[in-house]
Amino acid sequence: MANFLEDYFLLKNETAKRLFFEIAKDLPIFDYHCHLSPKAIAEDKPFDDIAKIWLEGDHYKWRIMRANGAPESLCAGPGAWDEKFLAYASALTKAAGNPLVQWSHLELKRIFGIEEVLTPQNALSIREKANFILAEKRMSPRSLLEQFKVSVLCTTDDPVDSLAWHRAIAEEQRLGSSFTTKVLPAFRPDKAMKTEDISAWNAYIDLLGEAAGIEIESFASLADALASRHAYFHSMGSRLSDHALLVPPFIQASDAELDSIVRKGRSGEELWPIEREKLDTALLLHFGRLNAQKGWTMQLHIGALRNVNPGLFRAFGPDVGGDCSSDAPIIVALASLLGALEKEGNLPKTILYTLDPSKHNPLATLAGSFAGTAPDISSPQVAGKVQLGAAWWFNDQKDGMERHMREYAGVGLLGAWVGMLTDSRSFMSFPRHEYFRRLLCNIVGEWVEAGELPDIPLYTEQLVRGICWENARCYFGMF
């Protein structure tokens, strides 16, 4: 019987063990999508409480705490940190099969050297021990990034953001800082497409116009303002955009129609659903063109049905654990969107994520349909130009990751994939890369030991090294 989180955790064959310990384990991390705070990295204040690091803003943990009957004061609410930590420890004892069990204990083990299993009985003593280590070692955002060999970190940033904290980090590094992790912004213009609440949209468009120095009264001026901010992000090292879509839109409209829609919205009049979809389609095509022209990658996160619990949203707002997977159809409209960009020669590198696991195979086959799109048949291609993104959010667990990788491998080119990301708000989340790398090595090892894959470095070691590090380094063009 295996011990909990032993050295060979998730590595069930000899080939997997060799690939993980000799190839994957010590590779740098390219975390190309997360929600970490650049301000926290710039200021680099030492942490003082594991409870805060774990439970402040982490809706993954809040969901299981609520499911265990914890009062909201101990989840998104203002409860005491010792009580919150105890409530999380209690929920974790019932979370068999949930990745939080392994993730949390990997974090205790890798960051603090604590190998005790967390229980309600020892939770407060473990918190005290962890907090002592935090203070003794003066652990901070940068020290954790360095410990886990995070070479590149891409945050998620609104177009109106000044990127002052990114600028401060970059300037410090230019002057010879010992902190070497590249901290780069990613362009997330979702609020420009959120016209369901027209007053909130107008307030945001005012901010966008102010940031760009453009008065926005037409679609052309809206597009110009977004292009201006896109160019600014490019000057700050950004090479990715990111877009959250419940379902991909695709209803094209003339310039005159789009101007009319924007003017209607700017007047404060509610837009009809078909008008919203026309505007969303035009904006996504605009973002695709901007990305293609500058060599960026476009990320489409599809299928998160957000804020389904009205009471939770009313009390605490978005991103507190009130979201679920949508099963809405997505492929036809998305194929049309990508096809329109490809037809005009403006299809950028694109990563397609879905919250609905039944869409992994359709998205993988759609992605593979957009290989070989260079205008000249003799032109070199981008490996994995359009590809299936990592198992995302609710799929980001053992069964989900394994299913995702096997399905992608079956119909696509796994070896061109850019691999794992954390999508996290916690600086303690980087053991998730170890978790993923163990699963990847185990799958490759299974194929080898079943006689389904040649056991030579070109087919195994190069595959693992590429997915864990080298593919992202080449694909995103940030070096």
Image: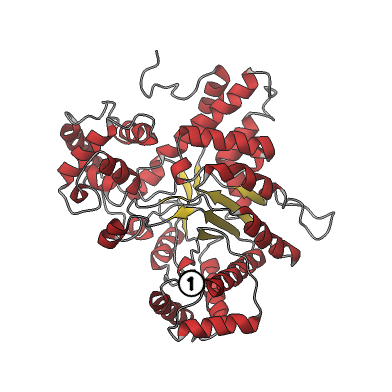
Q: Which residue is drawn at 60% across and 27% down?
A: 444
Q: Quadrant of residue 471?
A: top right
Tell which of 449 and 174 is nearer to you.
Answer: 449
Instruction: Write down the quadrant of residue 250 in the picture.
Output: bottom right
Residue at image point 43% right, 66% down: 167
Type of the residue with mark 1 = Ala
Q: Which residue is drawn at 22% across and 41% down?
A: 69
Q: In this view, does 218 lie above or below 293?
A: below
The image shows residue 203 at horizontal and vertical percentages of 39, 78
Q: Can residue 429 be seen in this view?
A: yes
Residue placed most toward the observer, 311 or 134 = 311
Element carrying mark 1: helix
Task: Name the spot of residue 158 as percent of width and height, x first.
Answer: 44, 67
Q: Where is residue 337 in the image (x, y as percent from the top left)?
A: 65, 62
* Residue at which label 1 appears: 192
Residue 214 horizontal/vertical position (percent): 50, 85
Is there any visible trace of residue 25 in the rendered image? no
**82 versus 257 height, above or below:** above
